Structure formats: structure tokens, C-alpha cells
Amino acid sequence: MAHMDTVPVCVGAQLVRQGDWIRSGHPERGIGADDRAGVAVVLHTALEIVRRKVPHPPLTFCWTVQEEIGLHGARCLNHRLLGHPRLAFNWDGGAPDKLTIGATSGHRLGIQVRGIASHAGGAPEMGVSAVSIAAIAIADLVANGWHGAVQQGKKRGTSNVGYVHGGESTNVVTDYVELRAEARSHDTAFRKRIVREIEQAFRRAADRVTNAMGDRGCVEFNGHLDYEAFRLPSDDPSLLTAEKAILATGRSPVRAITNGGVDANWMTHRGIATVTLGCGQVNQHMVTEALDLSSFRDACRIAFYLATGREEHDGSGR
């Protein structure tokens, strides 16, 4: 499997080949190798099996959507359509010998801050600034170690307020600000605590900001779990099979844990243990993103081996 979507910086991508690399020909655009390269690896495997009439075990090919905005394709996938696979492999970003066997959990949080509007010049004391509430809350999170890289004792995670929008004019005390935040951790209980700390910081800030009449604003929250954390056991059949395929290409497999989510989060959560391999992408989600074609060819060879138990020797995968 592989996901078909890319991130906004890759809209209008212009690809240029430079030797054995694909790079961007536009200074403000990425190339979308994450995950167009993964899509190509999976598609190449299917086409080669058909073209060459290669014997193979039962296979299911799956391309998901909306991975980048919360793994929605894998989350909403009707898993019964997959045919109950015993082994599962996902192609995403990174080197072809990197095996992602675990990933963090992620929670998305919407925050609505409501204040009281007033004339910022004529009667500022009558207003309750939603901007001030949001600013105090974020400063609270930063000061107390609950924003960015979060470490409390042996517990670790991350959080980020990544979207802030509000206000229409400088002569009006802003009465509404919308924010979006996230919390991540490999520890489910600690991720939930990070979410609680974010909510409590905003409630405290709302209590601190009052107008001349003693009126306060308020905050509202809505959120959802993007994906739950997982870690494959060291003897997982998909993992051991993938390592064998990587060794067959002359590479040495490396097991990795990621702080981002992958489609394998939901696949594994639904009972289909899935290992994730890369295709040679570097600097994903950046304008400097590039694809190493040598690694991409190896990814094609690995995928073909996993699908058929045979090595590619005819130069395909170019």
C-alpha cells in the first residue's frame, strides 16, 4: 500500500532530473515524492507481475487518500475489502532499508476563544480580548514545558499550536480567536495529559482576563484522535519478511520508530500489522525535497520480492 496525497508545498511541482536524483525545478515547490514515489513502487509491482505473468500468492494492492491531513484514508478504509492479509507492507518516505515498526499517537484539538468586543480607543476597558487570552495561554504552555518538545520525568511527547486566526480591525477589541493544536506521544496516557494541559492553560487564561465590569471570556474545545500509537513486536512476520527482502537487495535493514503518523497506525490498530518502508525520498515536506533514484530502484526490487518471492534481474524498476 501507499498514500496518494502530498502536502500543499508540492502543488504545481516541477520535476528536474539531475544525474541519479529527481529535484524541484521551482524554488518554492517540493516534488511530492512523499508519497508519489511510494505510489509508483506499488503500481510498478502490480504492472510487472501482470506484464511478466509472474506466479504469486494472493495479493491486495491499496492506495489511500488524505494521509497527510490525519491518515483519514486508512482510518475510513473498509478493511474487509483487503481479503484478510497475513503480511502487510506500506511504502512511504525515507530510505528503502529503513523499516518503521512503530509510530506515535496524535490528537487534533480545535480551540475557540470568545471575548467581548468594544471600541479599542473609546472604551478598551469594556472589552475582553480573545487575543490576550490566547497569548497568555500559549505563553503558559511554553513556560511550563507543555509546548514543543514535551518532557516530564521519563514521559515524552510533543505539542504545537499551529493555527491562530482572529480579529478584523485594530480599533476593535477582538472578541473571537480560533486556534488549532495537536498533541503527540508514544504513551497514550501521556498524550491525553498533554491535551488536558492545553485545555487547562486556556481555561486559566480566560479566568485571568477581565474587563472593568469583571466580565470574562470563555473557551470551547473540540478534538479527535488522529491515530493511536503502535509498535510491532521484534518477531512480527511482516517485519521479518521485509528484512529478508532488504537483505536480498544487498542492503542492511534498520528498524526505526517515528514521531509522525503513518497509514500503518490505523492498519495495525485494525488488526493488520503493517511495516513501513521508504522509497528514497529525502527532505519530505520541504522545497528541497529530492528522490534518490538508486534507492527508488531498490525499493521497487524489494516490493517485487515481497510480492513474488523472486528477485528482479531484468532491469525493471527504472
Image: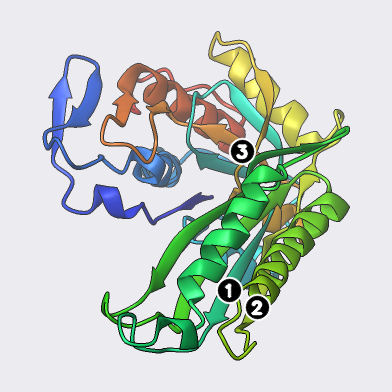
Closer to the camera in the image, 103 or 183: 183
Tell me the distance, in whole angstroms, between the alpha carbons under discs 2 and 1: 5 Å
Q: Give SS at disc 2.
A: strand
Could you tell me the amino acid type at mark 2?
Phe
Q: Which mark is residue 221?
A: 2
Residue occupied by mark 1: 111
Q: How is the image coloured?
A: rainbow
Closer to the camera in the image, 224 or 48: 224
Q: Residue at x 74, y 46 (%)?
A: 185
Check disc 2: other Cα within 10 Å, few if <14, some if 14-19, many if 20+. Answer: few
Q: Residue at x 43, y 41 (%)?
A: 38
Tell me: residue 157, above or below residue 218. above
Q: Give SS at disc 3.
A: strand
Tell me: residue 260, above or below residue 246. below
Mark 3 vs mark 1: give the one in front: 1
Tell me the distance, in whole angstroms, between the alpha carbons under discs 3 and 1: 33 Å
Mark 2 vs mark 3: give the one in front: 2
